[in-house]
Amino acid sequence: MNLEQLTSFVEVAATGHFTKAAASLHLAQPSLSRQISTLEKELGAELFHRAHGHISLTAAGETLLPTARRMLADAEAVRRDMDELAGLRRGRIRLGATPTLCVSLVAEAISGFHHEHPGIELELVEKGSRELIESLGAGGLDLALITRTLDLGAQMPRLDLQEVLGEDLVVIDAADSHRLSGRDRITLAEVADLPQVLFHHGYDLREATSAAFESAGLSPNVVVEGAEMDAVLRFVERGIGVAIVPAMVLVDRPRLTSAQLVDPSLSRTVSLAERADVRATRAASAMESTILATARAMASEDTGLAAHVRLAG
């Protein structure tokens, strides 16, 4: 029995599916199946019921699961301790961030961090704020950058939150389009009449803007919906429609123009979250410092975002 087998077992138990678990672990499915089969032979018990494509834990699997999770957590703790002994010459950070931050603040922060600490391995997890909070609470992340346009208070047990930035939502359009006509402000009612590219349902930003339209009694003119951030930006650049996005995504995007959303104005808070009951590694602390320095730089006049991005506090 080895850690690789236990990792595979825990992932199959979490997903309830061999194919999904193999994809998550970047393994070929036959390799994953062999690992589970070998583990079952070594333990002398079947760990999963396999019936018509449905996977569930047997009694033996239920017994093994908490022990396997504890063994993997202990192995991760040993690795963290050894990385600490090596200082910042090597190590590993598991950073979570929302998609909108991955194309703005996080991209800038990682670039600077890698230049300063090339020996640190970085695992980036891109999910919505609610999922990041769950992953952080379960020990799957060291740090998470989350956004709060909606109340997440009840979902943040055992976490320390540090507000980093306040950021306006703006309306973007293709730079060669005339829909915004060089204006620097636009009302929500005016936006509702323009063709819009919307994010998928469940996306934090989509939920916040949908709530604003509903509250105002407006129905947006939707031409495309269901997209992720990269796709939304590309669709807008190609003139398909306008979109409501966080101001920071405009950095280094000359093919986009923007106007501030007013009546009502919408904003969000970017916060750095970490476990309150776990000591941060030196590598995680260094990443935190880099993120805060990057936030200060992005809120400066030099980026042109000073009107829309404010340092917290």
Image: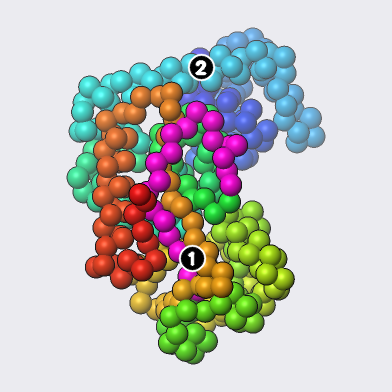
- Eyeballing the image, is 85 above or below 305? above
- Eyeballing the image, is 284 above or below 189? above
Dot 1 falls on a residue whose secondary structure is strand
What residue is shown at x 64% (from left), y 35% (from top)? Answer: 15
Q: Is residue 187 left or right of residue 252?
A: right
Magenta span: helix, strand or loop, mainly?
Answer: strand
Counting from the top left corner in percent of width and height, residue 22 is at: 56, 37
Q: Which amino acid does label 1 sit on?
A: Leu
Counting from the top left corner in percent of width and height, residue 3 is at: 47, 21
Residue 135 sits inside the magenta stretch: no
| Residue 6 visible in rendering | yes
What residue is shown at x 59% (from left), y 74% (from top)? Answer: 188
Counting from the top left corner in percent of width and height, residue 281 is at: 31, 28
| Residue 46 visible in rendering | no
Residue 154 sits inside the magenta stretch: yes
Residues under labels 2 and 1: Cα distance? 42 Å
Dot 2 falls on a residue whose secondary structure is helix
Name the residue carrying label 2: 70
Tell which residue pokes out farthest to the top in this image. 44
Q: Is residue 239 left or right of residue 37?
A: left
Q: Which of 154 and 224 is in front in this view?
A: 154
What residue is shown at x 57% (from left), y 26% (from top)? Answer: 10
Q: What stretch is highlighted in magenta?
A: 151-171
- Eyeballing the image, is 67 above or below 255? above
Name the residue carrying label 1: 169
